[in-house]
């Protein structure tokens, strides 16, 4: 039976995001005591703190100094561990509900430079023309060279209707270009869907929020009701540029398409970090053909779903290799309302694959990742990749299509979605193949 987690604070995600949410998988636990031997090493810290308090040229706020030192300590561990002030912790809790203020861009550090991972569709940043790979060198009047990710987020967030100017370096620019963007309340709709030709359904998951699996269930029911015979001929599940989100929602989404077997498991050093999640038949859909679209922006929770469906041969994974975040974070609240987000375990696909710093390799490769894109392996201090714990599941024998998307225009003049077009063609071939096999039998 599927192990269910109802705590809305369990997340699986990837980087840091402006006006979306922190990409991390997390649960809440109490802070543990420091081992006795560590206190001797802390004398150096207290000595320096005392010197600063007594001899620094100006008065200082001791809490600010301590907060900054903790931020530095945790930041040095890996890209996804961080210390959050009480205000940042509250903001993160609000973010998981999918409605918050900001610009609408995902950011990360690459080569010590603040870099745009992707603009979020239908947000101020998207409409302003920011692109994946853009390097942000200045926010307002502050240069980003020595800014932490959290500090950059703090500068870009603000009240609805207020402008912020960011300076961007991009391939082809002679000098940093200013983009003035008006902040807005970002309401990201988790699930979007529509009918395609010949009874094929299309569902796009933008994030894994609190109600994603429920909204997906409703979408699939609605699509089936609009199909001949009340059943979809096939489905395209689009996880492109989905940065992740709630772990239990990734499990529940996978459970929509699997009626048994392992979905994902985690392994860590501390007690309670080894968890296993299995599918059941509570919501399993008919065994219609499925294509899952992924790209370099598909991270963590998205990779859990793609990996589970790939290992169980339930769907064909199509697109380009995914981001590659295979670690799990735990949020540890502290006594003053602040919290530590700490990497505590790694997750593994049903066949035992760790995708950390490797990502999910599609069964059918269509297109190329954009130049300058960030992956987990590009982040400073990322956890090292590891080999599979068991032999990888046998992949379907599918021709690898390494064709770059053509410069074509679809209806209305917008660029044609070559990956979606290829997914539909592939579904049609599967349906035809199945029909031919039935006739022959």
Image: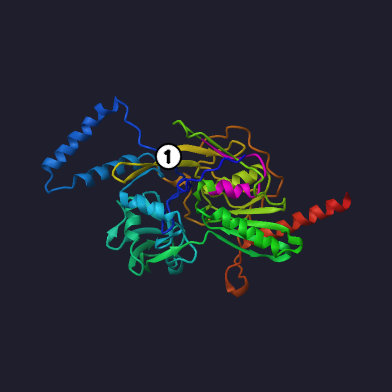
Residue toward you, 275 or 218: 218
The image position of residue 296, as x and y in percent, is 53, 52
The image position of residue 271, as x and y in percent, is 45, 30
Horizontally, is 242 left or right of 318 in the view?
left
Q: Please tell me whether residue 313 is drawn above or below residue 156 in the rendered image.
A: above
Rendered image coloring scheme: rainbow
Horizontally, is 76 left or right of 213 in the view?
left
Q: Residue furthest top?
A: 37
State which quadrant residue 4 falls in: top right
State which quadrant residue 143 falls in: bottom left
Reading the image, the residue beneath label 1 is 343
Q: Residue furthest bottom?
A: 412
Horizontally, is 154 left or right of 352 in the view?
left
Q: Please tell me whether residue 371 is drawn above or below residue 12 in the rendered image.
A: below
Residue toward you, 153 or 12: 12
Question: Which secondary structure lies at badge 1?
Answer: strand
Q: Residue at x 76, y 63 (%)?
A: 228
Tell me, yes or no, whether the highlighted magenta stretch contains residue 257. yes
Alpha-carbon neighbours of circle 1 within 10 Å: few (<14), some, or many (≥20)?
many
The image position of residue 227, as x and y in percent, is 72, 63
Residue toward you, 80 or 63: 63
Tell me, yes or no, whether the highlighted magenta stretch contains residue 373. no
**Residue span colored magenta:** 249-266
The image position of residue 380, as x and y in percent, is 40, 44
Q: Quadrant of the N terminus?
A: top right
Q: Is residue 186 at least partly visible in the picture?
A: yes
Horizontally, is 132 left or right of 216 in the view?
left
Q: Is residue 361 at least partly visible in the picture?
A: no
């Amino acid at each position: 039976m599927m192990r269910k987690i109802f705590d809305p604070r369990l997340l699986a995600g990837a980087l840091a995001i402006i006006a979306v949410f922190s990409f991390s998988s997390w649960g809440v636990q109490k802070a543990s005591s420091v081992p006795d031997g560590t206190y001797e090493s802390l004398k150096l810290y207290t000595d320096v703190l005392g010197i600063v308090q007594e001899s620094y040229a100006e008065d200082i706020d001791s809490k600010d100094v301590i907060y900054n030192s903790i931020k530095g300590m945790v930041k040095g561990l890996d890209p996804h561990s961080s210390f959050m002030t009480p205000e940042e912790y509250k903001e993160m809790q609000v973010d998981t509900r999918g409605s918050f203020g900001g610009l609408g861009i995902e950011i990360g550090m690459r080569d010590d430079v603040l870099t745009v991972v992707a603009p979020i569709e239908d947000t101020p940043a998207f409409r302003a023309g920011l692109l994946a790979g853009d390097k942000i060198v200045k926010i307002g009047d502050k240069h980003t060279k020595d800014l932490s990710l959290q500090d950059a987020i703090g500068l870009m967030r603000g009240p609805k209707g207020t402008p912020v100017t960011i300076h961007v370096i991009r391939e082809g620019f002679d000098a940093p270009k200013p983009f003035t963007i008006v902040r807005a309340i970002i309401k990201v709709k988790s699930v979007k869907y529509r009918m395609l030709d010949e009874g094929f359904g299309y569902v796009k998951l933008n994030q894994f929020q609190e109600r994603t699996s429920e909204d997906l269930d409703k979408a699939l029911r609605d699509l089936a009701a609009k199909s001949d015979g009340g059943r979809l001929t096939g489905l395209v599940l689009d996880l492109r540029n989905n940065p992740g989100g709630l772990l239990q929602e990734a499990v529940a989404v996978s459970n929509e398409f699997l009626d048994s077997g392992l979905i994902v498991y985690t392994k860590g050093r501390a007690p309670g970090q080894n968890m296993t999640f299995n599918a059941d038949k509570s919501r399993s859909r008919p065994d219609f053909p499925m294509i899952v679209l992924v790209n370099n922006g598909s991270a963590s929770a998205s990779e859990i779903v793609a990996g589970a469906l790939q290992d169980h041969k339930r769907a064909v994974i199509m697109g380009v290799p995914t981001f590659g975040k295979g670690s799990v974070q735990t949020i540890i609240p502290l006594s003053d309302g602040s919290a530590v987000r700490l990497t505590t375990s790694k997750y593994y696909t049903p066949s035992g694959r760790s995708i950390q710093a490797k990502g999910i390799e599609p069964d059918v490769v269509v297109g190329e990742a954009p130049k300058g894109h960030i992956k987990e392996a590009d982040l400073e201090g990322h956890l090292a990749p590891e080999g599979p714990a068991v032999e990888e599941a046998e992949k379907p024998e599918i021709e690898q299509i390494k064709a770059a998307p053509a410069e074509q225009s679809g209806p209305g003049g917008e660029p044609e979605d070559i990956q979606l077009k290829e997914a539909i063609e592939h579904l049609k071939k599967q349906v035809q193949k199945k029909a031919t096999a039935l006739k022959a039998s």
